[in-house]
Structure formats: structure tokens, C-alpha cells
Image (cartoon, rainbow, N blue to C red):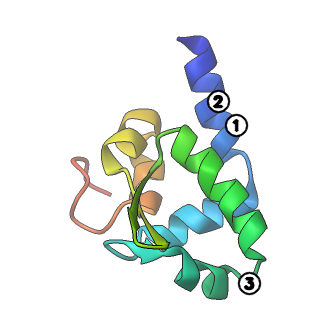
Amino acid sequence: MLADYESKFKALADQKRLLIMSELCQYEEVCVCDLVEKMDIPQSKLSYHLKILHDAGFILKETRGTWSYYRINESEVNKILSPELCCIFTKPNTNQTKC
């Protein structure tokens, strides 16, 4: 159980991944092609960071054709983060605690 938490916190311990999560929380879902432009990093590096976040359960992925679409897994974010930090990574008025 502790190893699960360790991997989750390691996934959050990177500025690029935090920026990706911040970007994702602004939309219902985002195509990886749009994230490449917004994040200004090569797709290979972006895919690396997305995989880590996905493996940790913080983001959800849906593949349609050749494109992948990502969104925040709010239930996982709410479980792992304090109410103050949850406000950063959730859409307004969707978290259960008041920010």
C-alpha cells in the first residue's frame, strides 16, 4: 500500500507533470496534439510524462483513432491531495470541499 502512495507522490514531484495536470483541469478533455502545442515540449517527452500520470491514476486516457485524449481523474486527485491542493487540480465547483 505504501508503495502505491510512493508512486503517486513521485508522479506529482515534477514541475512538467504538475503543469500538465494544471492544463488538463481547465478542460473536459484535451487531445495530446493540443497538449504538445500548449506545453511546448516534444511529443515523446510529453508522452513520457502523461504515462507516469496515467499509471499513477491521476489522469484518464481515451484513444479515438490515432489520437489520445486525456482528462483529470478527479476522484483520484481528491483522494490523494489535501483540500487546499485539490482546488488547484479540479475544475471550479466540482470538489467536495470549499476552497
The percent coordinates of residue 27 (x first, y second) are 36, 76
Gap between marks 2 and 3, in whole Å? 26 Å
The reply to whether discs 1 and 2 touch (Cβ–Cβ < 8 Å) is yes
**Mark 3: which amino acid?**
Asp
Q: Position of residue 68 (x, y in %)?
A: 47, 68
Say left or right for 18 vs 44: left
Whole-Å distance between the Cαs marked 1 and 2? Answer: 5 Å
Q: Residue 37: x percent and y percent?
A: 64, 88
Mark 3, residue position: 40
Q: Secondary structure at mark 3?
A: loop
Closer to the eye: label 1 or 3? 3
Q: What number is the disc on residue 10?
A: 1
Task: Give the number of the disc on residue 24.
Answer: none
SS class, disc 2? helix
Q: Residue furthest top?
A: 1
Q: Is residue 80 above or below residue 98?
A: above
Q: Is residue 84 above or below residue 20?
A: above
Query: Measuring 45% from the left and 35% from the top, which residue is drawn there?
Result: 80
Kind of residue indicated by mark 1: Lys
Residue type of the residue flagged with mark 2: Ser
Whole-percent x, y for residue 84 in the image:
44, 50
Q: Count the numbered circles shown.
A: 3
Which residue is tagged 2?
7
Quarter location, residue 2:
top right
